[in-house]
Image (cartoon, coloured by chain):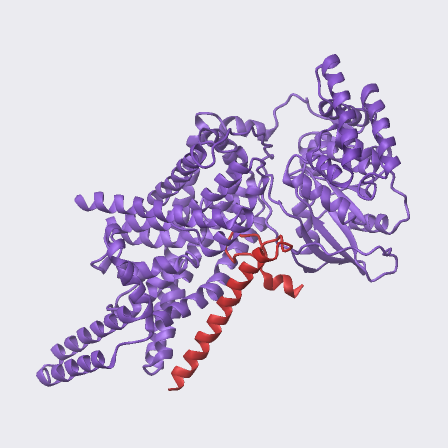
Chain colours: A purple, B red
Amino acid sequence: MAVTVSVVTVKKKTNSKNIMSKQPITMALAGNPNAGKTTLFNRLTGARQHVGNYPGITVDHKEGFFSHDSQQVSITDLPGTYSLTAYSIEEIVTRDFLTGQKPDVVINIVDASNLERNLYLTTQFLEMGVPLIIALNMMDVAKDRGIEVRHKKLSELLGITIIPIIARSGEGTDELITKAIEIAKSDRNWQAMDITYGEDLDESLLEIIASIKNQQFLEDIYPPRFTAIKYLEHDDEMLRKGQAVDPLLASKLEETVTKVSDHLQKTTEVYPEAIIADYRYGFIKSIVRQGVLTHKFDTDRLYTSDKIDKVLTNRLLGPLIMLAILFGLYQFTFSWSEIPVSWMEGLFGWLGSVVESTLPDGMLKSMIISGVIDGVGGVLGFVPLIMFMFFGIAILEDSGYLARVAFMMDRIFHLFGLHGSSVMPFIVSGGIAGGCAVPGVMATRTLRSPKERIATLLTVPFMNCGAKVPVLVLLIGAFFAEHKALYMFLFTLLAWFVALVAAKFLRMTVLRGEATPFVMELPPYRFPTLRGLLIHTWERTWQYIKKAGTVILGISILLWALMTFPGLPQTTQDQFATEVTVATTNFAKQPDLLQSELTRIKQEQSAARLKNSIAGKIGSFFEPLSSFAGFDWRTNIAMLGGFAAKEVIISTLGTVYSMGEVDAEDSGSLGDRLVKDPNWNRVVAVSALIFIMFYAPCFVTVVCIAKESSWNWAIFSMVFNTVFAFIASVTVFQIGSLF
Amino acid sequence: MWQNIITAIIVAIALFFIGKKVYRQFRQIIDPSKDISCGCSCSGCDSISCDSKKEN
């Protein structure tokens, strides 16, 4: 079924009908968070958008294309929402898309195992009068819970088509799309449904609707009754739009709402929005009680997920189990990947020796060995480790455990002045290791408080993203080989601690303000499928390989050029040539000594050439300062390269130590070279690890921060993080050097 | 000599490739209508690259 997929901003829709037209039918996928929208989107389009068993994966909308029975379909995956009232960015994105783009049909994904709660959003689609079809998803989960949904009865009562599906396996999706296309092509006149909200509100609604109709107020965007309801719900976005379109009428409507709101406060002590929610749920109950929903088991019975949560999210046991799982993940990753990583090192060593013996000495040979094999090879050498780690993370994610981590961390986050919604951006950024700060920064869009949002997006880059992981693994593997998993675990905890302390500092100074409350839905535990785990693992591993083979390769070549040119001045070259002549003359009858002397001269010449290069001069420029943290000029080059992408630290170290004074042929892996280097030791390694974890985010993250906030905050992020990281590194190095 | 020429070509290609990536990241900020990220090519980053967008 899948033809092509892309993720783009949605194109303008034409007004022509799609019957017998080559114009694709436009569909929108909408529903509650974690109802399975992205799973269905991926299945239909063949896309591999990230799906996680936790809410809030989709913040923006994503568009894909597929064909079904020769019909081209353009489908948009909307963010998960509980309502269409503009309380959060997801609700605004969803509502604006439905009203602005007017898709031919909306597929409302409803979680059959949480029917009543999911139908709350459905009622609002019905009130909007959008062409609707319900995909009753997770029928298997509902069945396991002893819930029986009579979908035909529900369809009859709501007056819309309902197709039971299991998005994960694809069951029912063909029928769903066939029916959705039929609806999109049909001439049915979709009328907004009226739900009664009690005498007081209904009277006000009629009054507001009359004014709206009279002035055609926002009628081109929303049905009058929908606008009226949103006014009663004090929907900020609607009030803003109203003021922009017709300030006079908008003020009049707001007065009417205030009047009814005051009246309700006096008589019932309840706000209109609460009454509206009550009546919507009342409407849903009246539907489901007509034989739509039956529980085969005792409804008080604890579901398996709840039983597991009694232990896994227990106040005392939960955090301990969480730490044990994290440690277990690293233990698994390091122990299982050790042998394949050594194979990869062997492979790149062999490649280097092949090039060494095949190509004559020259620029190209130097670039291939030092820039490509020792540089990019160092990054690719960690592919097996990355793969095992992503496999472990995929298990945690697909099972639903990551959502529990977020739930448990929420309590801690409030202590540090952050919103519970900040937890997921932290995890996405690499809280468990292996994430990426860019989607982490983008995920902060779900935070409503601007100050909490800025505090979160400034601190998520402190997490150990997938690019930092190989650098950490390299240094930990080289200097703390006997306790790799333990050190990785401790450095992960340190990243969280520093991020939270930094957030607290920001919230107490430049971003002062109260923490807002947070409610999080815990999805049920699911047994991950092997196929799903392998797909997730491969997707991320492939991204890692692809980045190493493209961006990191490009940067490594450029850095190699910076480390090669302008070369040594002629006078210095002549001096080395003289030294070679003298050595050849002096040790002509002692071949062993001659060889050793020539190697020494060659190494000194390489080091001098590197130090005289553009990169060498930049590295040396910072050395007087960086030496306080234990970094020599070569490490400085790697740290500067790390601003482009953190993996570049490895590739640059690989190139620097290949081009410099160490003979690449018999020096072994990069880790071995660092251990042998007199400028490196355990204290320098810890100092470097701390600096790498906390200094300026990579270039793409900085651009993303600028886009999501402002350039001022992006620059602040670079300066604040680098200054903090440097102070921390200097402290560690100076104290560590005393012992 | 031939090694120098090939090396110069490779470095020029790398410069063009990385320069294009950097330009595209900045273009997103300059043009606010591009509200979806061009991607960072990282593992765990869901944003699709600008190249993939163009292909489709």
- Pick the front one: A632 or A118: A632
Spot the residue most to the front. A248
Quarter of the image with the C terminus of chain A in it: top left
Up/down of A40 relative to B21, above or below = above
Is A545 on the left or on the right of A214, as rendered?
left
Q: Is residue A481 visible?
A: no
Within the image, what quadrant is residue A503 found in?
top left
Q: Position of residue A368 (x, y in %)?
A: 38, 74
Q: Position of residue A431 (x, y in %)?
A: 46, 42
Q: Is residue A104 visible?
A: yes
Quarter of the image with the N terminus of chain A in it: bottom right
Within the image, what quadrant is residue A522 found in?
top right
Residue at x 37% of width, y 72% of height = A561
- Pick the front one: A671 or A566: A566
Q: Position of residue A8 (x, y in %)?
A: 66, 56
Residue at x 36% of width, y 81% of height = A358
Q: Position of residue A296 (x, y in %)?
A: 72, 26
- Pick the front one: A424 or A172: A424
- Pick the front one: A271 or A54: A271
In the rendered picture of this protein, how many numbered marks are placed on residues?
0
Up/down of A397 relative to A504, above or below = below
Up/down of A601 relative to A493, above or below = below
